[in-house]
Image (cartoon, rainbow, N blue to C red):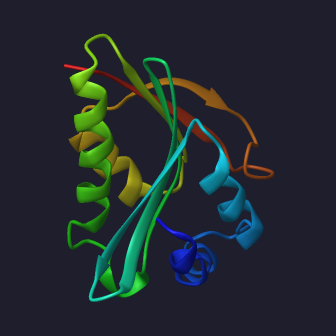
Amino acid sequence: MVPGDLFQVALIEREAFARPGARQRFETELGLPQSRSRVAEVEGAVLGYLIYWKVTDEFQILDIAVKQEFRRRGVAGKLLEGVLDEADALLGSTVHLEVATKNTGALGLYAAYGFAEVGRRENYYGPGEDALLLARESG
């Protein structure tokens, strides 16, 4: 992800999440030493993005989203595979993320890549909207 991608990333964020973050947050992420940002694009059009933090051997996926018309076509999987490949290169590393319990599409994706539930945050996304904490050990 580069500054020129931020407008398209912000549009995807608004489309994908009920409470989207501000574009300024993405600009901040680009400047943080622990933050890594990736986009999937075709001919300059951003199809999806992923933001994660890498601190020593721990990885925390903060956001992953794909433009509506490109969902269920492997875009999120490709973005995720890049992070998992990086984590797998560091034996003993762990990748963490949180996901809404109602997000069945994401839950299926994460299960397919070996993530397991390690906790739950009640009402994290609002009343009755819990978050599942998932983790995957490198391997």
Q: Is residue 133 above or below residue 91?
A: below
Q: Residue most toward the top?
A: 92
Report the front residue among 34 and 109: 34
Q: Residue most toward the right?
A: 127
Q: Residue at point 25% right, 56% down?
A: 77
Q: Is residue 38 above or below residue 95?
A: below
Q: Position of residue 19 (x, y in %)?
A: 73, 67
Q: Quadrant of residue 7?
A: bottom right
Q: Is residue 127 left or right of residue 75?
A: right
Q: Quadrant of residue 32?
A: top right
Q: Residue at point 23% right, 57% down?
A: 78
Q: Position of residue 69 (x, y in %)?
A: 35, 87
Q: Residue at point 65% right, 51% down?
A: 31
The C terminus - image quarter:
top left
Q: Is residue 36 left or right of residue 41?
A: right
Q: Position of residue 115 (x, y in %)?
A: 33, 32
Q: Is residue 18 above or below residue 83?
A: below
Q: Position of residue 100 (x, y in %)?
A: 57, 49
Report the front residue among 44 and 76: 44
Report the front residue among 6 and 129: 6
Q: Residue at point 68% right, 32% down?
A: 121
Q: How many labels were placed on the picture? A: 0
Q: Is residue 121 left or right of residue 63?
A: right
Q: Is residue 128 left or right of residue 51?
A: right
Q: Is residue 12 among the parts visible in the rendering?
A: no
Q: Is residue 97 among the parts visible in the rendering?
A: yes
Q: Is residue 37 above or below residue 10?
A: above
